[in-house]
Amino acid sequence: MTSDILERFVTLWVVIDPIGTLPVFVAVTAGFTTAALRSTALQAAIVSACVLLFFLVCGQILIDQLGISLNSFQVAGGIVLFLFALSMIFGDSKPQRELQAIEGDREVDTSTVGVFPLAVPSLASPGAMLAIVMLTDNNRTAIPDQAITAGIMLVIIFVAWLLMLASEKIMKVIGYAGAAVVSRVMGLILASVAADSVLSAMITIIETKSL
């Protein structure tokens, strides 16, 4: 049970990547008052948590309605997460990608930056949405199973909120280069988790001779 919780925590920490969000937060809140900074951080945390909770609940319903088996979804999801991890490792780092997106959108509404780009896609990224569905798909009818995943996700979002509040101090220590390095290390960990997910599903398929 402990190892399962640890695996879920690591997976969600990597795909949500609170450290990688810090450069984005600093960039979009430049010139904000202390009150505005706190309000934006809280908005980002609440919206991202709601989005991920929505996918946790509705993702399960969609999978059930489509009749997709656990093993099939685990293989497909693992492959997608692996590709997502490769983009984190070899492509632009998360901070670089999202800062470029901000620079390309000159009409970003400063009153809603907590929603875009901080909540979505920085915290509640496509990878995070997929991962949270995968992590609760191993037992579709178990409410405690979903509650554990939801609890872990909320803890990570809470940590992300605390980090955003202390973003200026943290960025002075690690800098943008440090945040990019952390993002790439997270990508390597995610690639390992995704590969393990695919291999586990393939072994189950071979052993049971069914999807």
Image: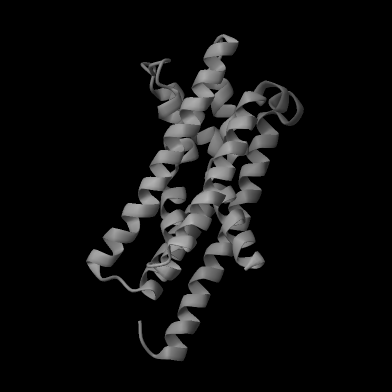
Q: Quadrant of residue 168?
A: top right
Give the quadrant of residue 3. Answer: bottom right
Number of marks in picture: 0
Instruction: Give x and y (percent) for residue 156.
Output: 58, 43
In the picture, the quarter occupied by the N terminus is bottom right
Say if residue 90 shows up in the picture: no
- Whether 25 is drawn above or below 8: the answer is above
User: Which image quarter holds the C terminus?
Assistant: bottom left
Q: Is residue 150 left or right of residue 51?
A: right
Whole-percent x, y for residue 201 in the image? 46, 76
Q: Residue at x 33, y 74 (%)?
A: 69
**Which residue is pictured at 40% across the width and 75% down the height?**
71
In this view, 69 is above or below 177 = below
Relative to 127, is 59 on the left or the right? left
Where is residue 5 shown, x and y percent of the image?
61, 61
Position of 82 compared to 104: left or right? Answer: right
Q: Residue 152 location, x and y as percent?
A: 56, 51
Q: Residue at 54%, 11% (x, y): give it.
A: 32
Q: Is residue 201 visible?
A: yes
Residue 147 drawn above or below residue 44: below
What residue appears at the point 72 percent right and 23 percent down from the top-left corner? 169
Q: Residue furthest left?
A: 65
* Residue ranking furthest to the right: 173
Colour scheme shown: one colour
